[in-house]
Image: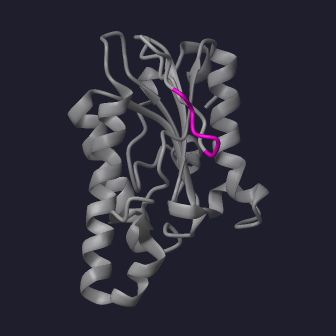
Amino acid sequence: MPRPIASPHRKLLRRADTPGEARFLTFSCFRRQPFLSRERTCAWFLDALDRARRTHGFDLLAYVVMPEHVHLLVYPGESPHRMADFLYTLKKSVSSRAVEYVRKTAPLFLDRMRDEQPNGQVSYRFWQRGGGYDENLFTSAKVWEKIEYVHLNPVRRGLCDHPSQFRWSSFRAYDSGSDDPIRIDFDSLPTDLRRRR
């Protein structure tokens, strides 16, 4: 069977659905536009994330919703789960909701979501095509490193001075145990990481 050929503009992503390994995910809005800069769309994303994790049996370890991309750290547990199914449920929900909202309230904005293929087929996208970035995390140290990376992302970008000031992140859950706006599954953290909270 021939190997899949990667587009020169898109990396070929191979997912390793290994039970018991945490996963670090990054995916972007269409053409890296700041579609997640509004509270409304951030809330839609977290609603969809909560639904997708319950539907597919994933635990949430950390997240940050940036204006034009998302970082997630999830744990699929010991039984086999397909990341592709989890991401489809998550992304499809947000995309459908956003496109419907734009059609009803700001139809001129649809041009920013328009994706016309060389064959003339047109679709409206919230998310960038492709799988994004997906990394299996094999060690507790790597899991903690990614949690810290996720929480410091808004500070590095100049969106806030301290991670506690950024609403759309799991930092406050780690800092104070708050379940607002979404619950973190601390029991799924490696034992040595629970002590570092």
Residue at left 42%, top 66%? 116
Whether residue 156 sits left or right of residue 113 in the image: it is right
Choose top left, top right, bottom left or bottom right for residue 95.
bottom left
To which quarter of the image does residue 159 belong?
bottom right
Position of residue 68 measured from the top left corner of the image (x, y, whole percent): 57, 62
Residue 167 seen from this side: no
> For residue 165, which quarter of the picture?
bottom right
Q: Residue at x 52, y 45 (%)?
A: 63
**The residue stretch that appears in magenta:** 5-9
- Residue 148 seen in the figure: yes
Color scheme of the displayed model = one colour
Relative to the observer, which residue lies in front, 192 or 108? 108
Q: Which residue is rendered at x = 24% and y = 36% of the image?
A: 54
Q: Nearer the viewer, residue 97 or 168?
A: 97
191 relative position to 127: left or right = right
- Figure label count: 0
